[in-house]
Image (cartoon, rainbow, N blue to C red):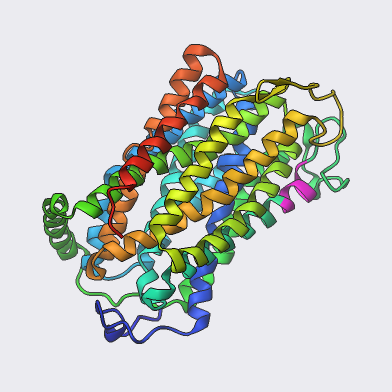
Amino acid sequence: MAVIAPDARMAGMGETYPPRAAVISWIFFAWAAEPFFTLITTFVFAPYFATHVAANPASGQSLWGFATAAAGLTIALLSPVLGAIADASGRRKPWIAAFGAMLVIGASLMWFGRPGDASVIPPLLLVFAIATIGVEFAIVFNNAMMPTLVPPNKIGRLSGTGWATGYVGGILSLILVLGFLAASPDTGRTLFGFKPLFGLDPGTHQGDRITGPLTGIWFIIFALPMFLLTPDYPAKRPVTEALREGMVELRQTLGELPKQKSMAAFLLANMIYTDGLVSLFAFGGIYAAGTFGWDTIQIGTFGIILAIAGTFGAWLGGKLDDRLGPKRVIAGSQLILLFAIVAILLVDKESVLFVRVAPPAPGGALFASAAERAYLVLGCLIGAAGGPLQAASRTLLIRLAPRERIAQYFGLFALTGKVTSFVGPLLIGVITAITDSQKAGMAVLVLFFVAGLALLARVRD
């Protein structure tokens, strides 16, 4: 594997950068990882689990929330430690490969989540958690490679382009599933009117379940260029020695953090608004399935439209990031998300913003009712704002963190993005279970973005 020259990785001396092919290969890692979030956690498998594996949508939303919370807590506890060890050892790719293997294995085993079989629920949630841990940790170490790829004044564009490319990968994977693999149980046809490839049975929802193995295969194929062409940091010391040094550096960083007021305020803000965003994406498809009765094809089409909005949002956000600064992009994105959430809570199948509308007609055209179209528009706002929020957050961390400890700080970044990531899904799960109302569960997300905006105001970019 290629390694990056020492002069290209010294803080303040990064005048030598790898060729365009290396940067493009790094960008395509987002393309490789995105189907896990698009197909499994948001638009296909999660709604399928809630509506066909669990006893009912409210119970499914609750169980999925608990599994997401458990994975998030594990990621939160281990991210800073692993980041510190990676900085001390020097290498990034071995960590990405190990956690990528967890993603591939965990996602592939989700194929066995048969509908209506309560016995598969515990192992299914377990392998989902394993895959979640794998993909999130792989992303942590992939992010840590960014400062060596482009000059500082192009970091925002690189980050935004990476997010946009990921969205495109998610769109294509969703089109592949909806157009050729997942068919309606009623008609036996896919969105494009075809019979499912490979003889997948619509009656047992094999088209939904195939998203697990597809995610694993997709990751292997499209992450490979990064391993082959993107330079890694050179090895510094053995893992055992790196473990000792990494822990010493982590304790030192945590001790210094209270003195770094902007960094501390940013990490705290990121902790809160990321929890809200992850919860919003994780439960958006489940909420739509329960509110409007959408099936896989309807939710997947909704996901394609949202991902297109997200692609343009992330691309534009990257340009605004370099021009206006990441803090302003983060604040603007949160305001859009806050408006969209409040508006969504005022939409159901028979009313839009307190105005009575005709409910969706059984067997009617796609998104034919006023309520469904309103939900679609608001979903596009969420998609368009979510990409810039995450991409600009990554850029702001790079601006605030010392380069020689970048993986460690990305570990802290993941910590703050995950340490309370169980809180959002847990609150949604608990409130939904208590009230038996999906809307009541989703309402809690308003608090996350209000608090995130308040804390972001204390950050000096």
In which quadrant will I find the N terminus? bottom left
* Span shown in magenta: 175-182
At 45% from the left and 68% from the top, the residue drawn is 322
Work out which residue is located at the far top of the displayed protein and give it.
435
Out of 428 and 325, give the one closest to the viewer. 325
Res. 113 image quadrant: top right
Residue 49: tell me if it is visible: no
Q: Is residue 351 left or right of residue 340?
A: right
Majority SS type along the magenta span = helix
Out of 166 and 222, give the one closest to the viewer. 166
Q: Position of residue 393 (x, y in %)?
A: 40, 55
- Say above or below: 123 vs 326: above
Q: Is residue 7 left or right of residue 380?
A: left
At 31% from the left and 82% from the top, the residue drawn is 14
Q: Position of residue 147 (x, y in %)?
A: 35, 72
Residue 253: tell me if it is visible: yes
Q: Position of residue 156 (x, y in %)?
A: 44, 67
